[in-house]
Every structure is written in structure tokens, then in C-alpha cells.
Image (cartoon, rainbow, N blue to C red):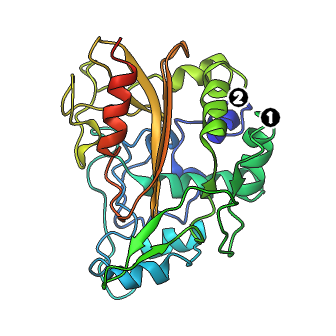
């Protein structure tokens, strides 16, 4: 959303390439085609995933210990694009030809925000989103510091190898990590859709699914985010949001999120007449899509 704001201010062109703004970021021998800023945001960049090709998944006990690690955007980018001890990954597909959900694109976007504004991501998100919407219960991560979720909090757990459940509310994370409440997430989706954060041209970007030269939504590859319901196997992400069709043909727009021991999501119809927010603590590290219980609750709430 911050890059959409910067676009409205004339400080960034969504159709200009990442290579223009950050010329040293993508290795030229692997990424020969330009990747636009818009393609970063709507998941059509073809970039590799976070830490692609990294060693095997850590053991449960290792994951519990690693939850305190804190990484900068630069560290994630370097470990993904220029890893030590293994081949550097190349693009998954030609930019703009397919859609594949890619959180690494958000890391690059975070780096771009810091480069353009000259401010830390935390400063920009606080000044541009949290304060204007009075999201007083939402806190952006402090780089390099592990922070607990303020009390009272929803507990989230991870199991050790011996089955013991560990409360993992203290975590490190990335510069873009935040803790929030369902009330603040509802304030965010209302402020995003009603024009308090974005001008009309940028708001329209939130509801535009990328299309191919044939005028149809691009094909979707990868995980299961876009592989259910009408339009199976076609793009479902816009610049920053995911579209979710309901049985009556209406559409919700929003975003899910996950962190170690936690899952959340916020969705609304474009006119804000329908809104849903969920947050849950889990006892698993799995983060593939919305949890089944959230999907059942949403269908029950919007069945009428």
C-alpha cells in the first residue's frame, strides 16, 4: 500500500523496472528481463521464493529456537539471491506471464520503499497507515529485536520433538512484521477501501487482477491460494490483495497472514457491506493458505 501511495505522489512508477530503482539487486546473469514494480506487488514477477533451495526444513526444536532470529530486508535478499554454498536461483517464469504467490517480492518491495523514502520501513508504515487510521493496538517490528505480543494476547504454540507445547509469542522476524488485533485489522480494511489511504486511481489497483494479452486472467501456478472455486487455476491476486469468490457469486478482497504459531486474515466486499476478520493461535508451523476453520466460519457468516 505504501508503494501505491508513493505512486500517487509521483515518487515511484509502478511500470518502471526494479532494476532501474535497485540496479545491483538482481544478478544480471540470471535475471535478464525487466521486472516491474507492479509485478512485484501482484505476484507476476517470476522471482524465486524466500531462501529457495535452502537446506531441509528445521526440526521442531530448531524452529522454536530460530523464532527469535531477526533479519533485515538486505539479509533476506542476499540469502535468497546470492546464497552461500548452493547455486543461486533464477526466475521461475518470464515476468508478466503467470501468477505465483511470492513473499520474496514483498521483501524487495520493502527494500524499495526504504531506498525511495530514505526512511526505515517501520517509520513509513507507522506514519502512513497506523497513525492516520488510529491503529493504536498495532505495532511494527523493531529491527534486530525480539518482541513479545502485548498482554493480554492470543497464545500460539509450537510443539517440541517430545510433544511439549511452547508458547511462541516472543519472536524476531522481518522489518515488515507487525502485531495487531482484529479490531485494528477491521480499521485497516475500512480505511483502505473507503479512500482514506489511497486516491481513486490507486484504490482501483486493489481490485484489478492481472491479465494476459488475450484479456483473460493470467494462469496461476504454485501453491493452492488460487486453485479453488470459480476461475480455478487462474490469477486471484491484485496489487496487494487476494480475491475470494463466495457461493452467491459475490467477491471478498483481503489478505491472509501467518507467523510462527499464528494465523490471521481480513476480508471485505468492495462496498464494505461484508467484512470478516479472524485471528487464531495454532500448534503448527504450517502456513499454507487460510485455515479450514476460518474458511468454514466465513462461509457460514456470508451464506445469507
Question: Which residue sits at x=59%, y=40%?
Answer: 182
Q: Nearer the viewer, residue 66 or 149?
A: 149
Q: Quadrant of the C terminus?
A: top left
Disc 1 is placed on an element classified as loop
Q: Nearer the viewer, residue 84 or 16?
A: 84
Residue at far left of view: 232
Question: Which residue sits at x=42%, y=23%?
Answer: 252
**Which numbered dot is residue 132?**
1
Q: Position of residue 154 (x, y in %)?
A: 56, 55
Q: Quadrant of the N terminus?
A: top right
In the shown orientation, is residue 221 left or right of residue 4?
A: left
Question: Which residue sits at x=38%, y=84%?
Answer: 61
Task: Give the crowd class for mark 2: few <14, some 14-19, many >=20 residues within 10 Å.
Answer: many
Task: Give the crowd class for mark 1: few <14, some 14-19, many >=20 residues within 10 Å.
Answer: few
Q: Position of residue 24 (x, y in %)?
A: 54, 66
Question: Which residue sits at x=66%, y=38%?
Answer: 184
Q: Nearer the viewer, residue 13 or 182?
A: 182
Q: CA distance from mark 1 to mark 2?
A: 8 Å
Tell me if residue 83 can be seen.
Answer: no
User: Mark 1 or mark 2: which comes first in sequence?
Assistant: 1
Q: Quadrant of residue 49?
A: bottom left
Task: Give the number of callouts.
Answer: 2
In the shown orientation, is residue 129 left or right of residue 280?
A: right
Q: Position of residue 301 (x, y in %)?
A: 40, 22
Q: Nearer the viewer, residue 83 or 153?
A: 153
Residue at far bottom of view: 85
Relative to residue 38, is residue 243 depicted above or below? above
Q: Are marks 1 and 2 in contact (CB under 8 Å)?
A: yes
**Which numbered dot is residue 197?**
2
Amino acid at each position: 500500500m505504501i508503494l501505491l501511495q508513493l505512486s500517487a505522489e509521483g515518487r515511484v512508477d509502478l511500470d518502471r523496472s526494479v532494476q532501474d530503482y535497485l540496479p545491483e539487486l538482481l544478478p544480471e546473469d540470471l535475471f535478464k528481463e525487466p521486472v516491474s514494480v507492479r509485478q512485484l506487488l501482484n505476484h507476476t514477477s517470476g522471482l524465486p521464493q524466500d531462501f529457495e533451495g535452502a537446506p531441509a526444513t528445521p526440526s521442531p526444536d530448531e524452529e522454536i529456537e530460530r523464532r527469535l532470529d531477526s533479519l533485515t530486508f538486505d539479509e533476506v535478499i542476499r540469502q535468497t539471491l546470492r546464497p552461500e554454498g548452493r547455486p543461486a536461483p533464477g526466475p521461475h517464469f518470464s515476468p508478466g506471464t503467470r501468477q505465483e504467490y511470492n513473499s520474496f517480492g514483498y521483501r524487495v518491495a520493502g527494500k524499495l520503499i526504504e531506498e525511495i523514502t530514505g526512511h526505515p520501513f517501520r517509520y513509513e508504515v507507522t506514519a502512513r497507515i497506523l497513525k492516520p487510521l488510529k491503529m493504536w493496538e498495532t505495532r511494527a517490528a523493531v529491527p534486530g529485536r525480539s518482541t513479545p505480543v502485548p498482554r493480554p494476547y492470543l497464545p500460539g504454540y509450537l510443539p517440541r520433538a517430545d510433544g511439549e507445547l511452547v508458547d511462541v509469542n516472543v519472536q524476531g522476524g522481518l522489518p515488515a512484521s507487525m502485531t495487531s488485533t482484529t479490531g485494528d485489522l477491521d480499521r485497516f480494511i475500512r480505511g483502505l477501501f473507503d479512500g482514506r489511504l489511497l486516491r481513486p486511481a490507486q484504490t482501483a489497483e486493489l481490485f484489478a487482477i492481472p491479465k494476459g494479452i488475450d484479456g483473460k486472467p493470467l494462469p496461476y501456478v504454485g501453491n493452492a491460494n488460487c486453485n479453488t472455486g470459480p476461475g480455478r487455476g487462474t490469477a486471484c491476486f491484485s496489487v496487494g490483495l487476494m480475491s475470494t469468490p463466495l457461493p452467491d457469486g459475490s467477491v471478498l478482497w483481503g489478505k491472509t497472514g501467518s507467523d510462527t504459531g499464528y494465523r490471521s486474515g481480513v476480508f471485505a466486499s468492495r462496498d464494505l457491506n461484508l467484512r470478516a476478520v479472524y485471528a487464531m493461535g495454532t500448534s503448527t508451523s504450517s502456513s499454507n493458505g487460510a485455515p479450514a476453520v476460518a474458511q468454514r466460519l466465513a462461509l457460514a457468516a456470508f451464506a445469507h
